[in-house]
Structure formats: C-alpha cells, structure tokens
Amino acid sequence: MTIERNYNDELDDSENSKSEKYAYGFDFDVMHPYMIKSFEPFFNKGSLLELGSFKGDFTKRFLPYFDDVTCVEASDVAIKAARKKLGDKVNFVNSLFEKVTLPKRYDNIVLTHVLEHLDDPVLVLKRINDEWLSEGGRFFLVCPNANAPSRQIAVKMGLIKHNSAVTSAEAEHGHRCTYSLDTLERDAVAAGLKVAHRSGIFFKALANFQWDRLLQTDIISKEYLEGCYKLGQQYPDLCSSIFLMCERGEK
C-alpha cells in the first residue's frame, strides 16, 4: 500500500515543524553559489527546467543565465513563496514529476537535492532522458553525499548508524535514500542517461549547524571557502554534495 505524501509538510522548516531544522544558511550562502560555479562551464544556451524549486532561492541564481526558466514543484506552498520572490520571471508548474506533462524539451535540466526524496528515482531520471532533455541538452544532478566527512564523523560518534542511513529528521522531510557517487551513477545509467562528468561540491568536515555558527564569525574567510571548493574537486567522495553532469542516452 502506498501512503499519500504531504509535500507541504515535508518542506515545513518553520518553528512549528515537529522535525529538526532542515535548511541552513550554509546551504543558501555557501552551497548554492558553489553549485552554480560547478554548473556554469557546462551551461547550454537556451531553456532551463528546474525540477523541485522549493521557495525559489536557488531558482533566482539561474535568472542571470537564462530567460526561459520553468520550474516543476510538488508543494503549492513552496510555489506561492517562490512566486512572491520571482514574480513572472519563471513559469511554475505545480505537479509531481511522475505525472507532469511538459510542452517541450529543455536545453538544461537541474535536479539538486531532490532525487533522494523520490519514491522511484529511476523512473523520474528516465523521463528526463526520454522526454524532457533536448538533443545536446545537459542534465545537472546533485545529491547530498553519504560519504561526506561530516556524516562519517557522525557515524563514528554513534549519531548515525551507517554512512548511507536515512536519519529520522531526513525521513520526516521526505528523504528515501542517501546517495554516494557509485549508487547515484548506478541510477543515472539505469535510466539510460550518459554520465559525461562527475565531481563533488565543497569539502565538508563539519555539520551544517556548525557551519552556520562559524559563518557568523571572522574565522572563515572567502579564501578558506574557495579552498574547500577546490579541495572538493580533488576529492569528490569527501564533499558535502556529489555532482553528475549527464547527457541524453539512447532510449
């Protein structure tokens, strides 16, 4: 039996939420800019499809690069918040990825920190490959990394059972799995996608709440952040997030 999901509840990160804090300043202020920096060399001219826009904070970062932006989001509450920020600059579609009908193919497709939420990730990846990605299009896939040092430290501390475990807080916010580079590429290939580039985004040995506290001090400099980003490219398996850039494969 499939339990119907409430996507508004899963995205709730307010003080009224019963679960632990989910979105941190580290995500918005550090990870978002470095994701864009990782994507930028591979951007195609043309259209962009973002799958899972949350409240539009990451979406906003694409507007300097693309005039044609479409976002598919399951939560109507998130779309309302995103529309308030972005107005009519973005075409929002309130639907599930598994059910949505889109009018065309896209030159760039972005799926960041969303795949781990899906009940059938390969099904959605297959739709991206077969239905939505244009000929010559590029697909930017990012997920939290099971092997991030901060997570491995939590395992050694006894806070998490194993690297790829889904914690109770993650489960309450809709996580279904925790990917590593090998399992992420496994699902991409199973969907028919061709992996053209693999990397990591930002070396990370501290938890998000620890980063948020440090970022309010003068301990962390811009040069240190840049060093963590560059080190992450050298050691992708020790990054906060893992990144695949994919192209269309044969059906």
Image: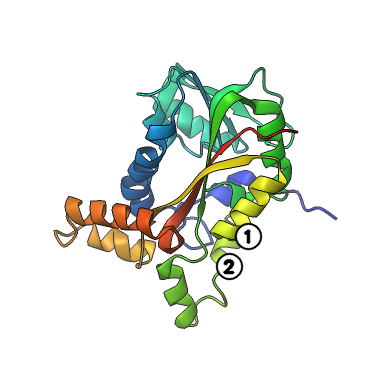
> Could you tell me which quadrant the C terminus lies in?
top right
Place of residue 204 in the rendered image (x, y in percent of width and height, measured from the top left): 36, 62
Place of residue 126 in the rendered image (x, y in percent of width and height, measured from the top left): 71, 38
Per the rendering, the mark at residue 177 is: 1
Place of residue 73 in the rendered image (x, y in percent of width and height, measured from the top left): 59, 35
Q: Quadrant of residue 236?
A: bottom left
Badge 1 element? loop
Observer able to see residue 233: yes
Residue kind at label 2, given as amino acid type: Ser
Place of residue 35 in the rendered image (x, y in percent of width and height, measured from the top left): 39, 43
Residue at 71% from the left image edge and 25% from the top image edge = 101
Give me the C-alpha separation between circle 2 and circle 1: 7 Å
Residue at 37% from the left image edge and 61% from the top image edge = 208
Q: Circle 2 is placed at which residue position?
A: 164
> Could you tell me which quadrant the N terminus lies in?
bottom right
Marks 2 and 1: CB-CB under 8 Å? yes
Q: How is the image coloured?
A: rainbow
